[in-house]
Amino acid sequence: MADALPAASRSNEAVVSRFFDGARPGTQTACGTGSVEMPILYFRDDCFAAFFTADRRRVEALMPSTQLHPIRIRGGRVLLAVVAFNYIDTTIGPYGEVGVVLPVVHAPRPPPPLLPGLMEAWYPGFGGLVMHLPVTTTAARDAGRSLWGYPKFVADMGFEMTPERATCRVDEGGQHLLTLGVARSGVPIPDRRPVLTYSVRSGELVRTSIPQRGLYRLGVNGPDATLDLGDHPVARQIAALDPSPRPVMTRVYVERCAILPRGEVVGSAQRFDGHLGGDAEGALDVCYLGGR
């Protein structure tokens, strides 16, 4: 497997080779008008995130299942995350993606406050309910919607990466959706926890466990992080959740790779389609240190 990786993806060839062992050969799977080889492999990306608080009652009203419970913080607030990915090297090509995610626990009763947010993947039933997931290609949209029920739509994205800051701007049809900016600072922490997501596909609640390997910098209270919301309908939906002016936590990955498998059905759920958007391909513009 290591010989098949581009040179840029082999910063730690021995570790990468072990991580991806068994992922190939995969299974060709139909989606939309095309097909993808499953699981999808992500060899290298730029990834950064900010975790805000939001109004508990407004977030609870969005839940597509009574078995999903937002993670409470304090003062009637719950968690809301915005995560940006510039996928540089993958088995379905490069593309951009931004997730608006509601951290939740899937359980018969609400979990205790705060603890699931601290434990994340180690807490039973923890995951992120994907509220919106703009991407820059129709191939990524079609695969995400048909195989997982992810609420994907196509948008334009511009990433700017400097040693001090990571920024992503999302627009669709000339309307500004959001701009996320995060300082590239904080305590370095190795990350071997899987990313866990919840989505709704044809009335089924799907939980997906995504193995990853990475190293991120953790920032607390995010004084230099910003989330600017535009006039797009999705931006107005996010604003209606009353996100906090600044995040309680930020993460900027120094390196990361992942494997996206099929999910498992864990129950039934109401429709959670999100914004549909149009069929045109999106634009992806990436700028490093002022050069392109």
Image (cartoon, rainbow, N blue to C red):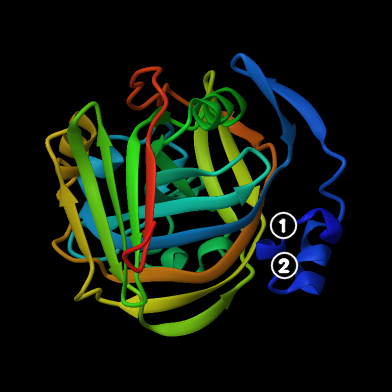
Residue beneath label 1, please? 6
Q: Is residue 70 visible?
A: no
Nearer the observer, 56 or 164:
164
Q: Residue at x 35, y 54 (%)?
A: 159
Give 189 or 162, whichever is nearer the viewer: 162
Q: In this view, which residue lies farthest toward the front? A: 291
State the SS at label 1: loop
The residue drawn where x is 52% and y is 80% is: 189
Q: Secondary structure at mark 2?
A: loop
Do the residues under discs 1 and 2 have CB atoms within 8 angstroms? yes
Of all residues, the one furthest to the top in this rendering is 33
x, y percentage for residue 246? 18, 66
Q: Quadrant of residue 15?
A: bottom right
* Quadrant the C terminus occupies: bottom left
Check disc 2 and report the residue beneath it: 10
Badge 1 density bin: few <14, some 14–19, many ≥20, Cα 10 Å = few
The amino acid beneath tag 2 is Arg
Q: Amino acid at mark 1?
A: Pro
Q: Residue furthest bottom?
A: 187
Q: Residue at x 36, y 64 (%)?
A: 113
Q: Quadrant of residue 274?
A: top left
Q: Residue 97: x percent and y percent?
A: 43, 44
> Left of 283 or right of it: where is 52?
left
Number of numbered markers: 2
Q: Is residue 99 left or right of residue 211?
A: left
